[in-house]
Image (cartoon, helix red, strand yellow):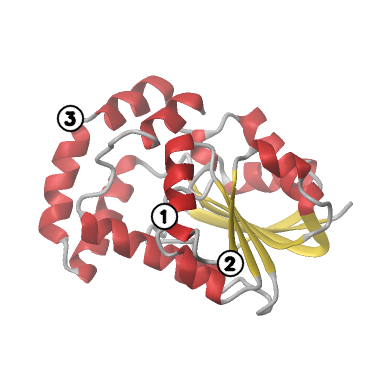
Amino acid sequence: MDEWIDYYDSTHTIYASKQHRDVHFEVIANDIIGYIPSPDAVVLDYACGEALSAARVASACGKLILAEPAPGVRGRLIARFAPNTKIRVRSLDELRGMEELSVDLAVLNSAAQYMTPAELDSAFAVIHRALKPDGVLVLGDILDPRVGMGRDVMALLRFGASHGFLKDALVGLVRTALSDYRQLRSRVGLQHYSEAEMLAKLKAAGYSASRAPKNIGHNDARMTFVARPID
């Protein structure tokens, strides 16, 4: 995961435009809000990235913990949300010292593909320890091995067309094909899991899980799972 952390901590070009970036985080925030069980819930966003719309999530819960491994991104989160008393920014290492049974909803979205299987197991364990007995883990944007990159391209183009940045999306695809992201993806790779594989992995980590009807975010070719601690 370290190489991916370094990439996202750099000046990357993963987003086609500012509009693409902003809408991307707005859609994710709206989807996360749909899982918040109550206005006083404690929500953990594990490996949250820039989380530009986190204030919207915080307004729908009692406390929002943004946990981010990239130090540069984490610094921007601290600066951006310092005035918001509902938001706390933490490193992933700091989560190991969190109070047990203190989180109502944990979200791990669009991060599992960058983790080794062992790193994902470790994340599941940290989250399991923090979740309340009736808490929920939402695991989003899981890549299915049967779905190729072409589906990601089409999902981005549809997203761009529906939100007014189709031209930027087309230019962005060309730029990404020539970028460090494409080289890193080819060299390091991304983790893929079938539905059955992820359900088995969650069960081994102490969760009862099912696949959600809809993925978090714009790409319906990817999968989201809803998991609850069982031990």
First of labels 1, 3 by sequence position: 3
| Residue located at (65% from left, 66% from top) | 63
| Residue located at (63% from left, 72% from top) | 36
First of labels 3, 2 by sequence position: 2
Residue position marked by numbered label 2 in the rendering? 85
**Closer-to-camera residue (138/127):** 127
Residue position marked by numbered label 3 in the rendering? 178
Disc 3 element:
loop
Quarter assignment of residue 146: top left
The residue most toward the front is: 83
The residue most toward the right is: 231
Q: Work out whether 39 lies above or below 31.
A: below
| Residue 175 percent location from the top left of the image | 16, 38
Q: Work out whether 164 lies above or below 7.
A: below
| Residue located at (79% from left, 59% from top) | 102
Amino acid at pointer 1: Ala
Residue position marked by numbered label 1 in the rendering? 221
| Residue located at (27% from left, 55% from top) | 156
Amino acid at pointer 2: Thr
